[in-house]
Image: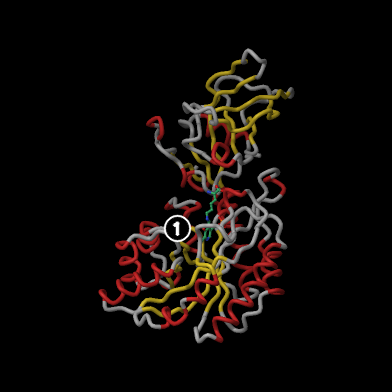
Amino acid sequence: MLSRQIVSELTRLETPFYLYDTDLLRRTLESVVYESEKYGYKVHYAIKANYDDHILGIIREYGLGIDCASGNEVRKAVELGFDPKSIVYAGVGKRDNEIEYAVKQNILAINCESIEELHLIDAISKKCGRKTDVALRINPDIDPKTNHCIDTGQADSKFGISYEEVLQHVDDIRSLENIDIIGLHLHIGSQIRELHVFENMCDKVNVIVENLTSLGFAIDFVDVGGGLGINYDLPENEPIPNFASLFAIVRQHLNVGSRDVHFEFGRSIVGQCGELITRVLFNKTTATGRKLVIVDASMTELIRPALYGSYHNIENISSQDSATEKYTVVGTACESTDVFDENVGLRRTKRGDLLTIKSAGAYGMSMASRYNLHDIPSAVYSDKL
Ligand code: LLP
């Protein structure tokens, strides 16, 4: 809960904006570093979750690498001073110029998602006079038991190469002289709260690593992706995700000898550190009796509820009213799905009140759009208030 003093400072600012709790970000980073160091695990931050410069600067202080999904993300990481040898780059559809940039930066690995892409990386590496380190992104066919919009590792998904296809092309892959297959990469999905699914993932990885090794591939590291979920229902109860439990499961079930083990966390690093602060514009009641609160944010600032039906906890931080009412909180965009939540209990809400939409540090700002020519939201940081 934000202090009265902070709320009164926020009241003077133009809304909507993202408010980032940099102290919580630091405590989250301390936790992930502390827990990962117990096992010698390497952690990359999935920059797609939030590419804010101030946030990235703090993340860099803690020595994390970066996981990228586009050439521009690789460029951003390099330009902000992340060591290229801590950068990995995945993506089903990399353009030639994006691959060329990554090849020239000599990053840790391009995580390759198709046989055609392997050939292209080989050809571009040859043209650049380089040998490029590549990890094979294998689709492990695992149900991560999360929202189906954000699972990525099931057999029919567009992500990764099927293991069978790799086996069919072993000689072909071996013949590529300008790439070295040095790693194995998987990412089964996002917002995973049932941690036992990571056990299934480890079991599959064990078999794949053993087989690839016996086929002559020198796999140095296994990158098991990200996906650790956060508590959207009760963020105050779990501000820092349970990295310790995930690492303990992987430690217990992954059997990859002395190879390095990497993770790529996005949501779990920044999700709870950010909230979207928005102001109530109007209240009205529909003919059916539904009480609407119309706020000055919309799906253009935070698209997750409209896109995936995702839940974000909302609170009225201005009202002192002890009475609560049920409201439907809607945004300003010309879309009927622009609804932040229905039937949400809020302290009695009036024009001008500030609402906070919590757990919005990941995939909030980074998915903002300019639909309806809305401005991209600004950011306010607790250490700069
Ligand atoms: N590695 C790869 C290859 C990924 O595709 C992703 C996320 C991550 C790591 C980081 O996953 P995380 O730790 O954040 O779960 N926009 C959606 C989430 C899409 C995730 C895409 N990939 C949302 O708002 O829920």
**In percent of the image, x 62 and y 83: which residue is there?**
257
258 left or right, relative to 128: right
Q: Position of residue 20 (x, y in %)?
A: 53, 46
**In percent of the image, x 55 and y 65: which residue is there?**
139
Q: Is residue 102 above or below residue 364?
A: below
**In percent of the image, x 69 and y 55: which residue is there?**
193
Q: Position of residue 237 (x, y in %)?
A: 72, 48
Residue closer to the observer: 126 or 265: 126
Element marked by disc 1: helix
From this viewpoint, which residue is outermost toward the top? 287
Q: Is residue 244 above or below residue 357?
A: below
Q: Quadrant of residue 37?
A: bottom right
Q: Quadrant of residue 104?
A: bottom left
Q: Is residue 111 above or below residue 297?
A: below
Q: Position of residue 183 (x, y in %)?
A: 50, 76
382 left or right, relative to 71: right
Q: Position of residue 310 (x, y in %)?
A: 61, 41
Q: Which residue in the structure is indicated by mark 1?
A: 57
